[in-house]
Amino acid sequence: MPPATRHLSEWIDRPAAEVYDFVSDPANLPDWAAGLGTSVENVDGHWFVETPGGRVGVAFVERNPFGVLDHDVTLASGEVVYNPMRVVPDADGCEVVFTVRQRADMSDEDFARDASLVQADLHRLKTVVEGSG
């Protein structure tokens, strides 16, 4: 049976290119993705975030004209979690869509909590980016 999946989104009243530029820079993660971690560090071209569960690696796909922000998070255990993410243009604004998948070792309660944290991060992103414009 495939894992449970939730597509979470937030409409942002800023141009898609501006939102993409902000989110694609891992240095900005602490500003909007507190659910992931609170500090970020670049070590020899690799990005690491300090989380309550330990240090994790974060690697975004290469910049692209399609708004794709997929990224891998390498947990302290070494497990790699793939995270699909997009910035979808809409007139003068955009929608940011993040797909959350339930991992095999994740309870339904943990999955719901994870989805809630991601939704809060997306809302924080909206607040930060709309406030900076």
Image (cartoon, rainbow, N blue to C red):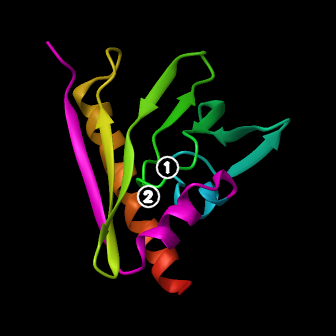
Judge from the rendering whether residue 61 lies leftward or rightward of residue 92; answer left or right: right
- From the top left corner, tell me how far across and down residue 63 is, in percent: 57, 49
Residue that mark 2 sits on = 121
Which of the 4 image quadrants contains residue 95?
bottom left
Residue that mark 1 sits on = 35
Quick check: marks 2 and 1 in contact, CB under 8 Å?
Answer: yes
| Residue range highlighted in magenta | 1-27
Q: Is residue 101 above or below residue 40?
A: above
Residue 96, visible in the rendered structure? yes
Depth order, front residue of 94/83: 94
How dense is the environment of label 2, judged by Cα within 10 Å: few (below 14), some, or many (20 and up)?
many
Rounded to the nearest angstrom, the CA distance separating label 2 from label 1 is 6 Å
- From the top left corner, tell me how far across and down residue 64 is, in percent: 51, 50
Q: Residue at x 29, y 27 (%)?
A: 102
| Local SS, label 2 | helix
How dense is the environment of label 1, judged by Cα within 10 Å: few (below 14), some, or many (20 and up)?
some
Residue reaching furthest left? Answer: 1
Q: Residue at x 58, y 42 (%)?
A: 62
Residue 112: within the magenta? Answer: no
- From the top left corner, tell me how far across and down residue 8 is, in percent: 26, 51
| Local SS, label 1 | loop
Tell me the amino acid under the disc marked 1: Gly
